[in-house]
Image: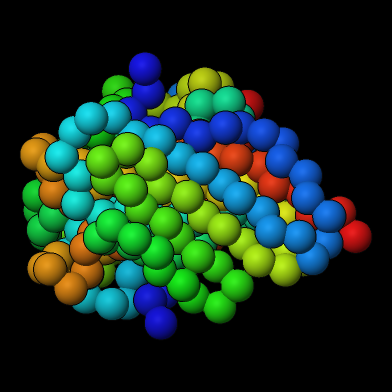
């Protein structure tokens, strides 16, 4: 089974702090994604990566950056956390090639609260 | 118009009934279609994938795809209270990044004991 893990289930930070959210997958997937999910707004893509050191902006990249130094690990960075970044953050991964059909598998999520 | 649309519900069905969840998507080339189940406070879990027109069955779940009409549906037979969750429809559109999925906002299903 695909396993995607995230570094924290719950996180509380203060405005202005630098926040790191880490995601690790064990299926040798090429593609990794960061979403945020808010009530009434659904899942929104922040960034994704299709290879080591590669990244592409999603729909809402402002205020975030990412890092992918190793294939299995994808980090989301909030350079200066703000209260409007309070949300559930979800990491996902998918394989490439015709067999995968781009199925994405999600980690358990990190509920971040910025005070 | 959103690219992937779902009726937000809530949809309530009695235990043992068939729950029918629908999803329509925009007129773009699309490759693959997915249904995810999300319990409150948890992350989405992939339950069905479908790639070609017709029906695909997996246990109590049946996914139906009609590309001409641009809809995909999920039927849950013999619904159980444990099926109560939000169901997300996702579509892989082409062209653009072949790796991305576009998600609907979800349909909340409640199965009444």
Quarter the C terminus of chain A occupies: top right
Report the number of discs: 0
Kindly give the residue lying farthest to the right in the view shown: B113
Residue at the spot x=72%, y=68% of the render? B78
Left/right of residue B88 with respect to residue A71 in the rendered view:
right
Q: Check the picture and name the quadrant holding the N terminus of chain A.
A: bottom left
- How far from the left and from the top, in percent, is residue B18? 69, 59
Instruction: State which quadrant residue B101 falls in.
Output: top left
Residue B97 position (above or below residue A31): above
**Residue B10, horizontal then vertical, whole percent:** 72, 36
Along the viewing direction, whichever of A89 and A59 lies nearer the viewer:
A59
Q: Residue at x 38, y 41 (%)?
A: B71
| Residue in front for this viewpoint, B111 or B82 | B111
A12 or B35: which is nearer to us?
B35
The outermost residue toward the bottom is A1
Is residue B72 something that shows in the picture? yes
A70 sits to left or right of B90: left
In this rendering, is residue B91 above or below A61?
A: below
Q: At which x and y percent is residue B46?
A: 46, 63
Q: Could you say where residue A88 lies in the image, as x and y percent from the top left? A: 54, 41
The reply to whether residue B100 is in sight is no
- Above-or-below relation of A60 to A50: above
Q: Looking at the image, which residue is at 51% across and 26% down?
A: A41
- Residue occupying image coordinates x 61% and y 32%: B8
A101 in relation to B24, above or below:
below
């Amino acid at each position: 089974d695909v396993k995607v893990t995230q570094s924290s289930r719950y996180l509380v930070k203060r405005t202005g702090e630098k926040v790191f959210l880490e995601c690790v997958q064990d299926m040798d997937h090429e593609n990794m994604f960061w979403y945020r999910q808010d009530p009434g707004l659904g899942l929104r893509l922040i960034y994704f990566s299709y290879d080591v050191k590669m990244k592409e902006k999603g729909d809402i990249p402002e205020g975030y950056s990412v890092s992918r130094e190793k294939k299995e690990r994808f980090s989301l960075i909030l350079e200066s956390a703000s209260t409007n970044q309070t949300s559930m953050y979800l990491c996902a991964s998918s394989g490439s090639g015709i067999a995968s059909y781009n199925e994405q598998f999600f980690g358990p999520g990190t509920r971040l609260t910025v005070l | 118009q959103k690219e992937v649309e779902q009726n937000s519900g809530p949809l309530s069905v009695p235990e043992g009934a068939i729950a029918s969840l629908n999803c329509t998507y925009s007129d773009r080339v699309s490759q693959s279609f997915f249904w995810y189940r999300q319990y409150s406070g948890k992350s989405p879990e992939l339950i069905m994938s479908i790639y070609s027109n017709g029906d695909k069955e997996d246990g109590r779940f049946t996914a139906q795809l009609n590309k001409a009409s641009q809809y995909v549906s999920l039927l849950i037979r013999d619904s159980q209270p444990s099926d109560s969750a939000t169901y997300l429809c996702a579509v892989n559109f082409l062209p653009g990044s072949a790796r991305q999925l576009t998600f609907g906002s979800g349909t909340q299903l409640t199965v009444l004991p």
